[in-house]
């Protein structure tokens, strides 16, 4: 009964992105370390550290995800993408040891999303990355569930601060279920309240217009 | 589903009342409601019982399970067992709230009953969360939980379905064969 006025497009978790999802668009802004395999003539302005007109072969630079995906080709003639450090072996062992300790928001707010997109780049470590993502999710699930279902009417910024964006969405749906139930138990369901749509439009009340 | 919708469904349950008016049998679409005679108990659905109570035309009798000793036994049983025990009634939470809000004068020891029902609810919800966690942890495809009531399912539904969706998509990363070949779009 408290449906929003529009239904936001959810992010496409996994190897596909949802074209219209805001989360996915923001995700594709993340920068990845790449190494160019061929010369990029007259694009020297992209690489701030060198002053030349073109980007020579073998330069290491950072490009956003959307550009990397577009330029990447199987035959590896244009780019080769390296893994950001949080998906490398060292951090993966940290995640498998205890996923709950890590502050996923600091690690890049789109850990799961970016990890899934990295699988496009034909890395030999792909199965391990995919496995690490899944295991981290499973490990943190309990903590997310407990905190979202128990924090009623409290300041949740401490709890949410360490969560990745995907987990934040889950946290919000957990809170919805909890708030709905608690609101019903207190009897708020029987009270007439202004709909959120009307409040958003901020219509003027007749009383204000007359006076 | 809203909790108010679950409450609406709960109002179909039958409860015994003692009317103080008389009326012949009434024939409704959902069924017949027997003749009302003052002082004689009759079974009616909860929506009608609450309406009559608010108009001060009846007295509501507590259902059988709404008794302090019985609820204490159920609470102890629930705490001992790992699985879900049969709930006092498929709508125990809603009926407790409705009856104790509108008819607490007809129900003895209303506050204790409220506390006991809340204890039973807390135990069951904790078991539900534990089983959801082990379901995800072992990545099962199928689980069966008996004796859950609609209200409990409703509070966890949104969260559990969203997490299962995420887990499914992360799992599909492990088998990349099906989703490769999306580059054509660029």
Image (spheres, grey):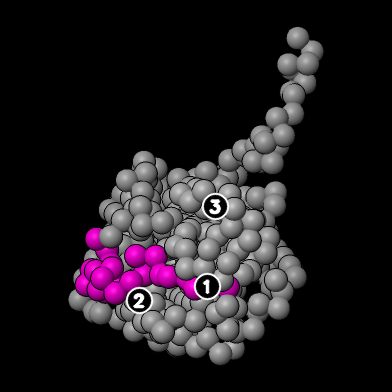
Going 43% across and 70% down the picture, which residue do you hit?
A: A82
Q: Nearer the viewer, mark 3 or mark 2?
A: 3
Q: Nearer the viewer, mark 1 or mark 3?
A: 3
Q: Which residue is mark 3?
A: A52
Q: Chain of mark 3?
A: A
Q: Chain of mark 1?
A: A
Horizontal side, residue B49 vs residue A84: left or right: right
Going 59% across and 57% down the picture, which residue do you hit?
A: A54
Q: Helix or strand or loop: what does disc 3 sit on?
A: loop
Q: Earlier in the sequence, mark 1 or mark 3?
A: 1
The answer for how far apart the CA atoms under marks 1 and 3 are is 17 Å
The answer for how far apart the CA atoms under marks 2 and 1 are is 29 Å
Going 73% across and 68% down the picture, which residue do you hit?
A: B28
The span picked out in magenta is: A78-101
Q: Helix or strand or loop: what does disc 2 sit on?
A: helix
Q: Which residue is mark 1?
A: A37
Say if mark 3 contacts mark 2, CB within 8 Å.
no
A118, A102: nearer the viewer = A118
Query: Is B119 rendered above or below residue B105?
Result: below
Give the x, y percent position of residue B1. Answer: 58, 63
Q: Earlier in the sequence, mark 2 or mark 1?
A: 1
Horizontal side, residue A135 vs residue B186: left or right: left
Give the x, y percent position of residue A97. Answer: 22, 72
The answer for how far apart the CA atoms under marks 3 and 2 are is 40 Å
Horizontal side, residue A116 vs residue A45: left or right: left
Give the x, y percent position of residue B160. Answer: 46, 70
Q: Which residue is mark 2?
A: A132
Residue with the most extreme front position: A52
Let me know if marks 3 and 2 both belong to one chain.
yes
Say if mark 2 contacts mark 1, CB within 8 Å.
no
From this viewpoint, is residue B123 visible?
A: no
Q: Helix or strand or loop: what does disc 1 sit on?
A: loop
């Amino acid at each position: 009964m408290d449906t929003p006025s529009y239904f936001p497009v959810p992010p496409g978790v996994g190897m596909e992105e949802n074209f219209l999802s805001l989360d996915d668009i923001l995700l594709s802004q993340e920068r990845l370390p790449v190494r160019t395999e061929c010369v990029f003539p007259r694009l020297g302005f992209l690489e701030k550290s060198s002053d030349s007109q073109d980007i020579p072969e073998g330069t290491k630079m950072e490009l956003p995800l959307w550009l990397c995906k577009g330029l990447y080709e199987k035959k590896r003639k244009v780019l080769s993408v390296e893994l950001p450090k949080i998906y490398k072996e060292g951090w993966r062992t940290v995640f498998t040891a205890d996923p709950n300790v890590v502050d996923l928001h600091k690690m890049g707010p789109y850990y799961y999303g970016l990890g899934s997109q990295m699988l496009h780049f034909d890395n030999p470590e792909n199965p391990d990355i995919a496995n690490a993502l899944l295991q981290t999710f499973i490990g943190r699930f309990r903590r997310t569930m407990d905190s979202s279902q128990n924090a009623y009417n409290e300041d949740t910024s401490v709890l949410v601060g360490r969560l990745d964006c995907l987990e934040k969405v889950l946290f919000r749906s957990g809170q919805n279920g909890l708030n709905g139930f608690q609101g019903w138990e207190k009897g708020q369901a029987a009270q007439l309240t202004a709909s959120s749509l009307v409040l958003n439009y901020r219509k003027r009340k007749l009383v204000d217009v007359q006076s | 589903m809203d909790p108010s919708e679950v409450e609406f469904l709960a109002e179909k349950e039958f409860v015994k009342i003692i009317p103080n008016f008389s009326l012949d049998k009434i024939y409704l679409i959902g069924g017949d409601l027997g003749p009302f005679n003052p002082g004689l108990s009759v079974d009616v659905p909860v929506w009608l019982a609450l309406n009559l109570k608010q108009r001060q035309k009846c007295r509501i009798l507590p259902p059988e399970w709404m008794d302090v000793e019985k609820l204490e036994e159920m609470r102890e049983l629930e705490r001992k067992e790992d699985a879900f025990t049969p709930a006092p009634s498929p709508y125990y939470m809603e009926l407790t709230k409705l009856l104790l809000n509108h008819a607490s004068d007809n129900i003895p020891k209303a506050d204790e009953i409220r506390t006991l029902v809340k204890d039973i609810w807390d135990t069951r919800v904790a078991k539900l969360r534990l089983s959801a966690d082990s379901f995800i942890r072992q990545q099962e495809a199928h689980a069966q939980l008996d004796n859950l009531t609609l209200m409990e399912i409703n509070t966890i539904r949104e969260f559990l379905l969203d997490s299962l969706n995420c887990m499914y998509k992360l799992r599909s990363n492990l088998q990349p064969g099906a989703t490769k070949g999306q580059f054509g779009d660029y």
